[in-house]
Image (tube, rainbow, N blue to C red):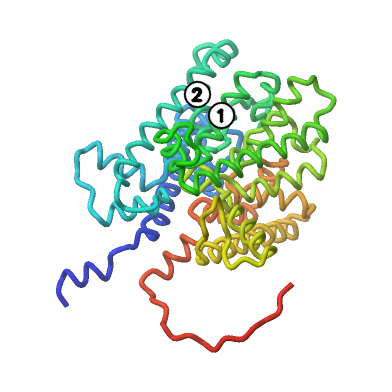
Amino acid sequence: MPEEIIHQKHRLSSFQIIISGFVGVILLGALLLMLPVSTTEGCITPFNETLFTATSAVCVTGLVVQDTGSYWSGFGQAVILALIQIGGLGVVTVAASFALLSGRKISLMQRSTMQDAISAPKVGGVVRLTQFILRGTFLIELLGAAAMLPVFCRDYGWRGIWMAVFHSISAFCNAGFDILGTENNLYPSLTGYTGSPIINITIMLLIVIGGIGFLTWDDICEHKWHFHRYRVQSKVILAITGFLIVVPAAFFFFEDFSALPTGTQLLVSFFQSVTTRTAGFNTVALSAMSSASKGIMILLMLIGGAPGSTAGGMKTTTLGVLLANAVATFRQRDNAQFFKRRIDCNTVKTASTILTMYLTLFFGGGIFISVYEHLPLSDCLYETSSAVGTVGLTLGITPQLHIPSQIILIILMYLGRVGGLTLIYATLSGKKAGNAKLPQEKITVG
């Protein structure tokens, strides 16, 4: 057999490259975090804890088993931040950036992989889009750090520079990691800045900008305020994102925070609405929120952000397609529609498959943890929705979980970041379906 045929046979597909790239970075991060220099006490952290932390960082989730601020040293925090940045941009995008900086030519196969990694509509222009993403990312993170710098420097002195940079990157990448914890105050997140407009507004803007997707940025920068010129996908993302921020915020405003001053009440309500998609910061104690609010937060965590963004979840476009298909069914139309455009039937099938996968992972993981740990199912479902949606919000049970339950959350975080469909496509890569069609028969549903 000629060498070219052998090489072709063993060439990895773009989906296989993506999932193996994430695994490689996670394992490297876990090993680095095991080094004594990574902890404040100079001890060797068990592999299951470093694997959990590295997975959470690369999958930009924010669930932790050790307090990031007090347990990990400056070196350990730097490793976690690097993992967050790589996970937020995507392993393939980061690798492509090094190739671009070195002046190497990007092959067609590499361009195809980059296209799948950033959910670009076509291969053409993918290098330009990648350059745009890199420049935009570092500029926005720099502006976010600069905005928070005065507040953190006021409270922490020179260490405030590191605090501003860390939280800016963590917020933009929708990671939810914070380094504000101390030995006497573990896992505080941003509860110390509940009434700070600068911290709240900056973090919220970073989360939203990172979560609407790189293609939406491209539309906004190219067409400015001419909304009618945007891609249909960008229109759907912006419309659903706005709805999912304002409506839950209004609910939280009247349901949970009526005892706070009006200004703080507004900040807190909008922050909890924004952070569930899918950042993982919180400015209030989540356990104090009502059961109805927790249920809404679970739904928001499962939905997540936009495709080709730093956010996880099923994605806003998946929700939009499913809703459009429901409306089309109610009106007895043949196809779902958005902004006077018809949606392909295969897109509707894919959206239905994604919904089924997320609900299966969400409920399956929650039931396993509830049975194994003897914890209330509602609390476990909150944690699993946070994991599979790569959010990072927690009711406080994650640090107490045993290794089997931690493994479940690791799997959910990984699948939530790379995407269950990506894993299936990677597994079935090269296996072509037959062209034969089976006899058709109708089944009554509903």
Residue 280 image offset from top left, x and y in percent: 62, 38
Please tell me how crowded label 1 is: few (under 14), some (14-19), or many (20+) other residues with Cα within 10 Å. Answer: some
Residue 295 image offset from top left, x and y in percent: 76, 47
Residues marked 1 and 2 touching at CB (< 8 Å)? yes
Q: Earlier in the sequence, mark 1 or mark 2?
A: 2
Foreground pick, 423 / 54: 423
For label 2, the SS is helix
Please tell me how crowded label 2 is: few (under 14), some (14-19), or many (20+) other residues with Cα within 10 Å. Answer: many
Instruction: Confirm whether residue 34 shows in the render.
Output: no
In this rendering, position of residue 246 left or right of residue 18 = right
Instruction: Confirm whether residue 49 shows in the render.
Output: yes
- Depth check, mark 1 against mark 2: the one in front is 1
Q: Label 1 sits on what residue type?
A: Leu
Residue 160 image offset from top left, x and y in percent: 52, 17
Q: Give the farthest residue toward the right.
A: 259
Q: Which residue is mark 2?
A: 144
Is residue 130 positioned above or below 364 on the image? above
Is residue 92 positioned above or below 36 on the image? below
Distance between the alpha carbons at the discs numbered 1 and 2:
9 Å
Q: Which residue is mark 1?
A: 205
In this rendering, position of residue 118 left or right of residue 172 = left
The quarter of the rendered structure image containing the C terminus is bottom right
The quarter of the rendered structure image containing the N terminus is bottom left
Q: Label 2 sits on what residue type?
A: Gly
Q: Give the farthest residue toward the bottom.
A: 439
Is residue 427 positioned above or below 194 on the image? below
